Image (cartoon, rainbow, N blue to C red):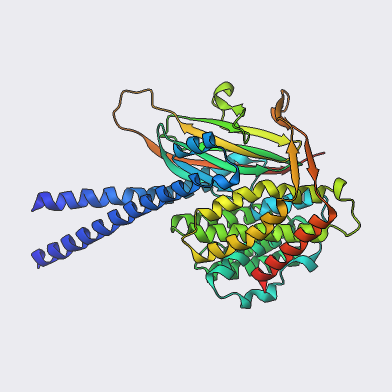
Amino acid sequence: MNIKLFRSTFYFIAIFSVIAILTNCSSDKEKSTDTDEVVTIDSLEIDEKLVQDVKTVKEIFYSLPSPLETAMILKQAGAEYNEEFLNPTENVTRYVTNKSMALNLGIYTTDLSYASLFDQTQATINYMDAAKNMAEGLGILNVIDEETVNRLEANINNRDIIMDIISETIMNSSSFFEENDRQAMSAIVLVGGWIEGLYIATNLVAPDDDLQNNELVKRIVDQKLTLSTVYSLLEENTDNDDVKNIIIQVDQIKQIYDKIEITSSEIEPVTDEETNVTTLKSTTQVKMSPSTFNQLKNQVKVIRNNFTL
Amino acid sequence: MKKIYQAIIILTVLALIPLSGISQCKSFAKKVCKLELAPYTHDGNYNAAILTEGEDAELYKTFYAGQNYRIYICGSESLPGIEFQVLDVKRNVLYDNRKNNYSKIWDFKLESSQQLIISLRVKHSDGESDELVSGCVAIMFGIKESDS
């Protein structure tokens, strides 16, 4: 009996070891392939020296604005709250594929962040529930559990705690995808959130607003800078068909952003000795026609409808 | 037979180290690193990896005018220390923590939005040990609404 038990243990450990080693090896291989792909993205105007530098770097991260940061940027730019531009929570039943659930996890998390920053308590609870629905559909257990929802409801009038809960929710989902080698899903969630931010922002600009002096328009224009990071993040995951499809849609936005000219001066860092906060001083000139802005607004609407309808 | 059995156990443990490392890194970022961002709010993004001394990493991100940011480079205690720089897209150095007593934190704001690169390198140990030390490194961002 002991010999039988020993043999069973032996075979179990041997098979487990081989699987574990193969998993780690393949994971490493994928990482190095990703890095190679990153280096070839010279279409994003990254010069050759930069490409050489990147080649030697062990890990490269492309960080998009999180749904929480997007909402904070909108508010700081003077945006007002308008629920009409959010994705109705009743739509949750429409999303049954991994792609649609990932996109709408990003979209609902952005809507949740936006509602919470404007102290919309009921909408905050509803959007947390919608995000929970998407997370569960994607198999992300415990990212938004009953305890999270209860904590949110118990602190619904404390914005700091609400923001902390949202931040933790975002981190739990992105780290879950990272841990489970589902980086493509993580990228899709972030792009969903990014498009939602653009959709809300472009809709909050009134037709008769002065485009040159509108802070919200400035933040929309700034997304031209983020666009290269969006591409890099998606290009790392082109083995995923859903990602390939999203790249085609992002291309349509890029063609419009290419018509917007941004020129920046050199950056001068100046540190306040008292607060120890550094200000990066620089100026930026933007050239964008009203027609280009309208094209951008319409194209973002088309893509957002593709993601939500 | 006993030796084979021992070898397999060692092999199994070695194979599992990277998997447990990823999980520990997440826990480290959530439980240790996030706390250091206060009074800034963590943006929620997870940027962490296991790095070995001498290895480096880079992060590309757009930072927006009107926001106050805190960058916190958080490394496991086992690591000898981390050098980090913040660069513009032309790779001009805007901040270097080697000139700031290897500070792990940098607070800044921008007059106009910029894409920046966070470049970091794990230092080599001062000791004479032949073994290279590895540990979790997380790049954390905190945001705070501007007072102005």
Q: Quadrant of residue A197?
A: bottom right
The image shows residue A64 at horizontal and vertical percentages of: 62, 50
Residue furthest toward the right? A208
Q: Is residue A155 visible?
A: no
Viewer-side residue, A149 vs B87 = B87
The image shows residue A245 at horizontal and vertical percentages of: 57, 65
As drawn, is A172 to the left or to the right of B53?
right
The image shows residue B41 at horizontal and vertical percentages of: 66, 46
The image shows residue B58 at horizontal and vertical percentages of: 52, 39
Q: How many marks?
A: 0
Q: Is residue B15 above or below residue B118?
A: below
Task: For the C terminus of chain A, give its image quadrant.
Answer: bottom right
Viewer-side residue, B138 vs A94 = A94
As drawn, is B88 to the left or to the right of A260?
left
Q: Is residue A197 visible?
A: yes
Task: For the N terminus of chain A, give its image quadrant.
Answer: bottom left
Residue, x 40% and y 32% (percent of image)? B53
Q: Is residue B6 above or below residue A105?
A: above
As drawn, is B115 to the left or to the right of A76?
left
Q: Quadrant of residue A136?
A: bottom right
Q: Quadrant of residue A278?
A: top right
